[in-house]
Image (tube, rainbow, N blue to C red):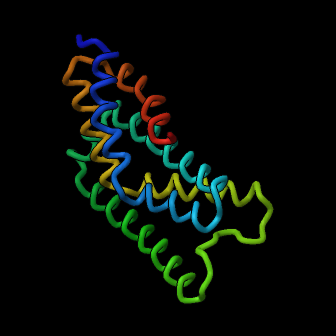
Amino acid sequence: MGDPLSIYLLVLAGIVPAQLAPGPNLVAVAGVALGEGRRNAAYVAFGVATAIFIWVSVSAFGLAAVIAVFPPLMTAMKILGGGYLLFLAIKSARAAVNGASPRFGAGEEAPRRRAQAFRRGLLVNLTNPKSAMMWAAVATFMIGAGLTPWQVMAFAPIGFASAFA
């Protein structure tokens, strides 16, 4: 069995650059930061990080195996993810044409806006098939390095913290 700490550090060294690379998660956080401010952007980031916690958890217990047995699941994830990203793009384009920032829930009380910001971050990441495949690959690597599924699951808070930071 591999040393969990050294494997966690190795995985963290690999995922941090991937998390910093521009993609749907970063665009969602930056877009809300520009249009809604830092506080709502933090809720989007919290949603993204929560989705990563979920991806690590389901990957630890066999997402890659499920997708291998049932390939239409990946196709469905791609369609759902693409549809959601298209929805966000249309919403942003309409806001640009109207000369407004792409606000969601404008004029609503703060707790509801925060919940919407969290949901946006969560959905952006959960509907991203690249995220699913990346975390399935990370879990496969960790299990191949000798960790148990529970030890892979124990990485979920680390992935969460890294994504939120």
Q: Is residue 70 left or right of residue 22?
A: left
Q: Which residue is drawn at 33% across and 23% down?
A: 8
**At which x and y percent is residue 46?**
56, 45
Residue, far bottom: 97
Choose top left, top right, bottom left or bottom right for residue 57: top left
Q: In which quarter of the image is the N terminus?
A: top left
- Quadrant of the rendered image containing residue 6: top left
Which residue is found at the position 45% from the left and 67% from the top?
84
Position of 29 compared to 2: left or right?
right
Q: Is residue 69 left or right of residue 43?
A: left
Q: Position of residue 151 (x, y in %)?
A: 37, 19
Q: Nearer the viewer, residue 36 or 94?
A: 36
Along the horizontal axis of the image, is 26 left or right of 44?
Answer: left
Quick check: 161 above or below 147?
below
In this view, 55 is above or below 97: above
* Closer to the camera in the image, 30 or 54: 30
Residue 87 versus residue 117 in the image, above or below = below
Count the marks.
0
Q: State the residue at coordinates (38%, 20%).
A: 150
> Picture coordinates of residue 141 (x, y %)?
22, 30
Residue 17 on image: x %, y %:
31, 43
x 44%, y 53%: residue? 125
164 shown above or below 30: above
